[in-house]
């Protein structure tokens, strides 16, 4: 017991999750991550709709942008893309 | 519920960009179907949501201390009391509104919807009596069951929602017992017997249909129940990229038909109408089974009877549903 014990004022809050999970980079799990061919994309938004990680950022107008910091590389977007514009690239 | 809402994907995307109800960085597995279900519930909501989660994958993976993925009011509940807490929240809201408790506080908005989300363990088995009680008392809440057909979070134990023949850690495949020997519990029929205004089955792969049903459930006049199909790549032994494909095949093979029950009247929706009108469109269950490792033993020589038995059960359920829906 060389280190002094923390008092109740120094301890972090208990039972309340206080940091947004966007600080946690789940993108590190991925082996493959999506790369969008912008010329093939028809902006249907299915990749955004079917992403379990809410990793796609889409404003409804431009080509959706996957946030690679959070993409776990499941590959649903590449499978479901109607024009096969998404390719899974090894990271 | 007079005019049917038509979801506009671009509008939904813009709204999600602004509000981000479910934030990235939760630790559900890659390719988890439940991640899509929870996003679609948040997309369909018109009013602010109060979200109550029974123990399960979603609850555990989205709130690992000190991280939280929720930008909406959210509370953790035990397996068995999620629906009871939902009724409490709803009853307290009604009381506070009735006595004008916050009439001079413009920051507090009591006009919100209560959503209770539970997995199949917390709904089929453990939480059933709390749900039954909440529905009997007629609380205005939407209960969403995301059905990944076993206790995936604790290590793939069989539940009342596990289908026939599926391999789980408590129903392993051996020489005598080959996966779960029993069939799935008809949960929607059990819930419909409570005479609630709205119940439906939802497959996130048909997102348009799913969003309309979530919206109808939230705006129903009383309790509503949504049974959402959710692929689990870890427990089902499927490829993560096939999540949506399996969800579509489950509907096309009639393993998981899409329908809604409005005031006790069964109505087929989406692709299930097309299959009811043209039975040739119904695909054999093998196509659904062969994508999943948990059914792999069914394709070994000597086990053909299992696929036949599964098909027989699916056909029987489908015939019963067609009769109820008036086909």
Image (cartoon, rainbow, N blue to C red):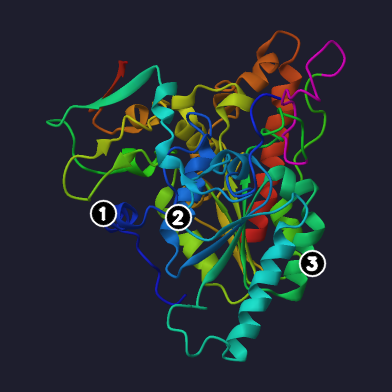
Q: Main secondary structure of the magenta part?
A: loop
Instruction: Write the start and end of the magenta stretch as one range.
Output: B160-177
Mark 2 neighbour density, 10 Å: few (under 14) some (14–19) many (20 or more): few
Identity of the residue drawn at 71% across and 28% down: B156
* Residue B35 as seen in the image, left or right of residue B293: left
Q: Which mark is residue B133?
A: 3
Which x, y percent locates residue B70?
A: 49, 51
Q: State the residue in front, B281 or B266.
A: B266
Whether the magenta-drawn stretch holds residue B165 is answered as yes
Q: Are marks 1 and 2 on the same chain?
A: yes
Q: Chain of mark 2?
A: B
Could you tell me how far apart the alpha carbons at marks 2 and 3 are, in whole angstroms?
29 Å
Q: Quadrant of the C terminus of chain A?
A: top left
* Residue B9 as seen in the image, left or right of residue B300: left
Secondary structure of the residue carrying numbered label 3: helix
Which x, y percent locates residue B34?
A: 54, 41
Query: Does residue B230 appear in the picture of this structure?
Result: yes
Q: Which mark is residue B176?
A: none
Residue corresponding to mark 1: B10
Could you tell me how far apart the alpha carbons at marks 1 and 2 are, in whole angstroms?
21 Å
Residue corresponding to mark 2: B71
For marks 1 and 2 on the same chain, the one whose residue lies earlier in the sequence: 1
């Amino acid at each position: 017991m060389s280190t002094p014990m923390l008092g109740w004022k120094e301890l972090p809050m208990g039972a309340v999750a206080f940091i947004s999970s966007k600080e946690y980079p789940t993108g590190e799990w991925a082996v493959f991550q999506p790369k969008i061919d912008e010329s093939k994309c028809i902006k249907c938004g299915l990749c955004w709709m079917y992403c379990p990680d809410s990793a796609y950022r889409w404003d409804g107008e431009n080509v959706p942008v996957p946030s690679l910091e959070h993409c776990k590389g499941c590959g649903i977007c590449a499978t479901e893309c109607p024009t096969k514009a998404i390719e899974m690239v090894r990271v | 519920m007079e005019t049917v809402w038509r979801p506009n994907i671009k509008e939904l995307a813009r709204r999600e960009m602004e509000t981000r109800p479910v934030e990235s960085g939760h630790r559900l597995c890659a390719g988890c179907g439940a991640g899509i279900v929870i996003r679609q519930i948040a997309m369909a909501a018109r009013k602010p949501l109060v979200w109550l989660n029974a123990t399960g994958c979603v609850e555990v993976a989205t709130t690992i201390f000190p991280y939280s993925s929720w930008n909406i009011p959210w509370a953790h509940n035990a397996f068995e009391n999620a629906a009871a807490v939902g009724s409490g929240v709803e009853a307290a809201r009604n009381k506070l509104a009735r006595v004008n408790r916050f009439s001079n506080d413009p920051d507090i908005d009591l006009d919100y919807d209560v959503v209770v989300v539970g997995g199949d363990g917390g709904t089929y088995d453990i939480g059933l009596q709390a749900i039954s009680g909440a529905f009997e008392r007629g609380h205005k809440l939407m209960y969403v069951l995301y059905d990944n057909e076993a206790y995936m979070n604790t290590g793939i134990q069989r539940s009342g929602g596990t289908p026939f023949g599926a391999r789980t850690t408590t129903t392993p495949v051996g020489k005598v017992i080959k996966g779960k020997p029993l069939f799935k519990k008809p949960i929607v029929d059990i819930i419909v017997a409570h005479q609630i205004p709205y119940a439906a089955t939802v497959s996130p792969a048909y997102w348009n249909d799913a969003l309309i049903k979530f919206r109808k459930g939230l705006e129903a006049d009383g309790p509503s129940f949504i049974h959402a199909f959710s692929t689990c790549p870890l427990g089902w032994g499927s490829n993560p990229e096939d999540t949506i494909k399996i969800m579509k095949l489950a509907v096309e093979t009639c393993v998981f038909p899409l329908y809604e029950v409005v005031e006790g009247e069964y109505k087929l929706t989406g692709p299930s109408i097309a299959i009811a009108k043209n039975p040739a469109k119904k695909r054999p269950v093998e196509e659904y089974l062969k994508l999943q490792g948990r059914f792999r033993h069914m394709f070994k020589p000597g086990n053909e009877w299992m696929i036949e038995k599964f098909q027989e059960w699916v056909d029987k359920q489908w015939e019963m549903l067609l009769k109820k829906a008036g086909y």
